Amino acid sequence: MSSRAGHNGDPLFMDGSFSSPPQSSKSTTLKPATTLSPHLPALTPTQSISINAAPNLWFLVFQDVIIMAALGLGFLTSSLRRHCWSSVAFNLFMLAFGVQWAVLLNGFLEQPSSGGIVINLYSIQLATMSAMSVLISAGSILGRVNLVQLVVMALMEVTAFVILRTFGKKFLYMDDHISLTYSHVFAAYFGQMVDWRLSKPLLEEAKEKVQMATGPGLFAMLGTLCLWIFWPSFNSALLDVTDERKNALFNTHYALAVSAVTAISVSALSNPGGKINLIHIHNAVLAGGVAVGPSCHLIPSPWLAMVLGLIAGLISIGGAKCLQVCLHHQLGIHDSCGVRYTFGWPGLLGGVAYIVQMVLRVDWTWNPMMDQQVLIYMGMLAWVVAIGMLSGLLTGLILKLEIWKAPHEAKYFDDQAFWKFHHLATGF
């Protein structure tokens, strides 16, 4: 397996650049230089891209991630006909709050010897991607909690995830790319446990508000399109080797394209009248990007990424059609925005695919200790699920306390409980 700069514990300098990998004693033949942008110098496929060498590229990637978080996830959760204002505004609030809290936590837990907190473009990007876990989890309980409860949830979840990521980086040698792509799994199971603890039987008037309307549904589709367009940037954001970044971009696009085709086709085929369900499109279109995330830079052939996108799309559609009603009746899990089968199950598929790719790529005769590393990666995936569920359960118990003054069941999924606009009482 080829080495990469900044991978598996290489030191991170104060300016955000990574140390260079050790040079092999054997002579190597480099491919022709590659230019990622007309504003950047030519780079060989094995060269790392530091922030100082390519500030424009890092800023563009950071901009893409911000658009995904603010617009993509904000509008994706706005499909409820009477709760779209709160969905978008609360998403922005949690993003801004979560980024600031994640920057502080990352600074304290990865404190340099000088004793200060380093804040640069890389640290803010890392904090933004960490805070996105809260935005995903909030999709499970939106409409049934107030802003104060969401603030408490953001504090708890960002803290748990940053500690988990730091533990994996220091003791299990997990790089930032792997830990951040596992954030989908963590966020999904965190949100499911919070949802389970807060679940109450819905009143008839609340059930009517859960339905999707044309206007909010169109805005939710806009969020889906933003995420679909910028997901390749998210999966490649923390990769600093040119060749790995290119592989991540291409493979993520292939997986997203196949999952989009799968979502639309299967949705139409599974309906007796051949009609497409927009809820399936909101969820299953993105499943390929989630599933290919951990291994996007390792997949050698496009067809492997496309197979991952196909399986992820089928899993997402199957969960939306078959298991949503069963889990709601049996466990009381409502899951307002389908987080479980949009991020949770495709994320687990992606974790397993990453482990398989590591096993297939490694020369076992050259590195006989690699079996321990594979066990570590398997344990890390199980650890992410376990910590997500335990921290989500604890957060759900805290949010259930009466001191937070949660909305009454009659006010579930209603913007009028949070906004001073009287016309919202009659819907859109």
Image: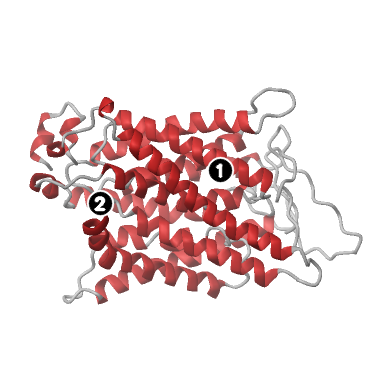
**Three-letter amino acid code of the residue under disc 2:** His
Q: Residue at x 57, y 61 (%)?
A: 296
Of the numbered discs in the image, which one, if any, rests on residue 424? none
Q: Is residue 257 left or right of residue 20?
A: left
Indicate the secondary structure of the residue bearing disc 2.
loop
5 relative to 134, above or below? below
Q: Is residue 230 visible?
A: no
Q: Amino acid at mark 1?
A: Leu
Residue at left 24%, top 49%?
A: 79
Labels 1 and 2 touching (C-beta < 8 A): no
Residue located 42% across and 61% down the image: 345
> Disc 1 and disc 2: Cα gap in Å?
27 Å
Q: Is residue 24 visible?
A: yes
Q: Residue at x 27, y 55 (%)?
A: 331
Q: Is residue 36 above or below residue 317?
A: above
Local packing at callout 1 (Cα closer than 10 Å; few below 14, some 14-19, many 20+) is some
1 or 15: which is nearer to us? 1
Query: In which quarter of the view is residue 25 placed?
Result: bottom right
Residue 403, horizontal then vertical, whole percent? 27, 25
Where residue 180 appears, as percent x and y from the top left, is 54, 48
For the N terminus, which image quadrant? bottom right
Left or right of 236: which side holds 409?
left
Instruction: Provide residue 100's location: percent of width, then percent of height.
Output: 49, 29
378 and 15: which one is in front?
Answer: 378
Q: Residues within 10 Å of mark 2 (few under 14, many from 20)?
A: many
Q: Earlier in the sequence, mark 1 or mark 2?
A: 1
Q: Which residue is mark 1?
A: 164
Residue 250 position in % (x across, y down): 56, 63
Q: State which quadrant residue 44 falls in.
A: bottom right
Disc number placed over residue 334 in the picture, else none: 2
Q: Is residue 245 left or right of residue 128?
A: right
